[in-house]
Image (cartoon, grey):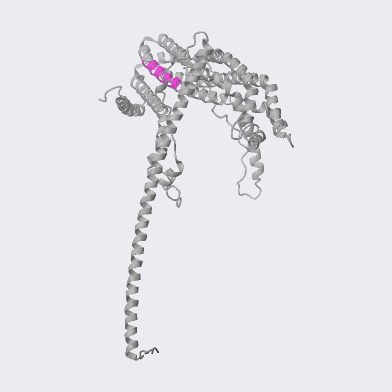
């Protein structure tokens, strides 16, 4: 059967119909596309929000995990510290009395030892505080407090509180004594006769020549005007420098008292004996507390040196070991410090006990007694009309001298503490210097089997040098402690020399000449009012400080 295709007749109207249908279909597709795009945009926005929430949640999770890890690390570090303290106490007890040593006995409450420990995140703290522009967002913490930086800062500030309070109290005490001294002097100066003043001045005034007062210089001959054509500026300056330079380079002159029995010379003589005795006591304390322990520690370190060196070399990769040798034993670890560890461990407790005690308590007490004795002698030698005034001024001088003495002893004590820390760290550099040639010889080994030969060179070198090395290190520590004691003595001599003059200056108001003109009377009256106001304000500050510390009531 034959099929016949009947073709649709194409007309303008049929094309228009098709075009209209196509446009409708295209419009529908376009609307669907726009809707899809809108949905995609909304989905992207929602995805961005979810990513932000996810990042925040992840950061919170990281922060929570980090805080938990930090807390665990802090507890572990504190426990390690307590274990180390317990071990040192047990070692010291065993050395002191090995027959009655009981390992189960607790020398102190170790659980109460709370070592300040901070696990900090400096990078997140910098980003949270926006210290660097464009540094990005923090990776772990969202709160500055969680970085532990604020807690560390607060703890560092707390370390200086006692020193700042002590300095402030010392300053207030000095100011109080000064104001009371001036007020007492101005109030009572007219009640003392000139004869009584002269008698006291003749007996106790030292009349020092001030060594700091510049000598009179001979000026060069007057030259013509600087702008004159014939003036030689270089020649003029050379002549001036030739006169000034010898005096500038000359050593400072020691003041010589006209009266060797004056207040300052008498005190200086007493102080010199006290300083010599204090230095001698320091020598005895260092010797009794540390010398025997150093001998024991040196023997222990010497016996363990070869094993320590061998274990050190076997505990790391050969390239790392060679890096240590190239740097004289110090790279990621310190072979010199490891060799010293038995020695430093054996003296750690005794070293701390020596420097934790009040080394200058007896010295301060006897110095104060010397000042009191001289003031009492001044009072006894004064005329009856001046004796009461001597007592008042003596109390002021004693109070001011005690304040200055406490500040001076505190400064010397802090300097000695700083010096002993430096001395305790000098052992490892000494060992390093003793082994320097050994390290050099070890580094010269090359080729097959060189690593084993390097270890043998170091181990044998340590073994050969061990006795002299540690005995010499102990001698260095004791010699440096001796030198530190002598330095303390020199510092005390200089400070007490100034204190002796200070006491005389404070007492000299009893015999100074006075001016009784009307103008001076007006000035004195105004000064008395100012001193009274200062004293009252100081008293307010002292009471406020006592109330804050719970030692008094503010009234």
Outermost residue, front direction?
Answer: 1
Q: Is 230 located above or below residue 202 in the figure?
A: below
Name the quadrant of the C terminus.
Answer: top left
Q: Residue 491, image x and y in percent?
A: 53, 22
Viewer-proximal residue, 72 or 419?
Answer: 72
What residue is at 35 percent from the left and 89 percent from the top?
8
| Count of numbered tags | 0
Q: Is residue 399 magenta?
A: yes
**Chief secondary structure of the magenta portion:** helix
Q: Is residue 535 above or below residue 237?
A: above
Q: Is residue 545 visible?
A: yes
Residue that lies at the very extreme toward the left in this rendered image? 555
Q: Quadrant of residue 68?
A: top left
> 70 or 4, which is in the foreground?
4
Q: Position of residue 220 (x, y in %)?
A: 62, 37
Q: Quadrant of the N terminus?
A: bottom left
Q: Is residue 306 left or right of residue 39?
A: right
The magenta segment: 392-406
Residue 511 position, x and y percent, is 42, 17
Q: Position of residue 183 (x, y in %)?
A: 35, 23
At horizontal 37% and vertical 47% (from top left) the residue drawn is 57
Residue 167 within the segment the image draws in magenta: no
Residue 260 visible here: no
């Amino acid at each position: 059967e034959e099929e016949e295709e009947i073709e649709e007749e194409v007309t303008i109207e049929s094309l228009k119909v098709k075009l209209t249908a196509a446009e409708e279909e295209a419009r529908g597709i376009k609307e669907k596309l726009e809707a899809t795009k809108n949905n995609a945009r909304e989905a992207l926005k929602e995805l961005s929000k979810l990513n932000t929430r996810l990042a925040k949640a992840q950061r919170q999770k990281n922060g929570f995990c980090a805080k938990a890890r930090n807390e665990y690390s802090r507890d572990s570090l504190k426990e390690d510290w307590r274990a180390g303290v317990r071990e040192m106490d047990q070692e010291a007890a065993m050395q002191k009395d090995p027959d009655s040593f009981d390992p189960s006995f607790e020398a102190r409450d170790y659980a109460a030892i709370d070592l300040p420990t901070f696990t900090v995140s400096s990078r997140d703290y910098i980003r949270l505080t926006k210290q660097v522009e464009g540094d990005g967002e923090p990776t772990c913490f969202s709160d500055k407090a969680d970085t532990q930086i604020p807690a560390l800062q607060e703890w560092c500030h707390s370390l200086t509180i006692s020193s700042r309070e002590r300095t402030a109290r010392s300053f207030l005490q000095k100011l109080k004594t000064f104001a009371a001294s001036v007020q007492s002097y101005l109030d009572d100066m007219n009640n003392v006769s000139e004869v009584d003043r002269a008698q006291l001045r003749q007996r106790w005034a030292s009349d020092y020549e001030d060594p700091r007062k510049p000598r009179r210089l001979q000026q060069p001959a007057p030259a013509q005007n600087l702008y004159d054509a014939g003036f030689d500026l270089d020649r003029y300056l050379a002549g001036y420098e030739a006169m000034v330079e010898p005096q500038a380079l000359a050593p400072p002159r020691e003041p010589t008292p006209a009266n060797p029995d004056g207040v300052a010379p008498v005190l200086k003589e007493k102080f010199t004996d006290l300083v010599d005795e204090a230095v001698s006591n320091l020598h005895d304390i260092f010797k009794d507390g540390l010398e025997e322990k150093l001998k024991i520690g040196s023997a222990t370190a010497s016996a363990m040196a070869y094993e320590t060196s061998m274990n050190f070399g076997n505990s790391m990769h050969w390239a790392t070991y060679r890096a240590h040798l190239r740097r004289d034993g110090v790279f990621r670890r310190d072979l010199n410090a490891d060799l010293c560890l038995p020695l430093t461990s054996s003296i750690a407790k005794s070293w701390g006990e020596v420097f934790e005690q009040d080394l200058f308590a007896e010295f301060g007490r006897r110095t104060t007694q010397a000042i009191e004795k001289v003031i009492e002698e001044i009072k006894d030698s004064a005329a009856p009309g001046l004796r009461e005034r001597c007592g008042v001024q003596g109390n002021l001088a004693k109070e001011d001298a005690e304040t200055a003495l406490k500040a001076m002893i505190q400064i010397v004590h802090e300097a000695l503490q700083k010096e002993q820390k430096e001395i305790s760290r000098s052992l490892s550099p000494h060992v390093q210097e003793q082994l320097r040639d050994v390290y050099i010889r070890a580094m010269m080994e090359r080729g097959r089997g060189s690593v084993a030969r390097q270890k043998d060179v170091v181990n044998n070198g340590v073994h050969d040098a061990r006795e002299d090395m540690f005995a010499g290190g102990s001698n260095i520590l004791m010699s440096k402690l001796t030198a530190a004691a002598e330095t303390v003595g020199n510092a005390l001599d200089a400070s007490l020399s100034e204190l002796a003059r200070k006491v005389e200056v404070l007492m000299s108001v009893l015999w100074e000449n006075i001016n009784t003109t009307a103008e001076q009377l007006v000035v004195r009256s105004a000064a008395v009012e100012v001193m009274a106001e200062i004293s009252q304000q100081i008293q307010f500050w002292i009471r406020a400080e006592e109330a804050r510390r719970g030692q008094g009531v503010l009234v």
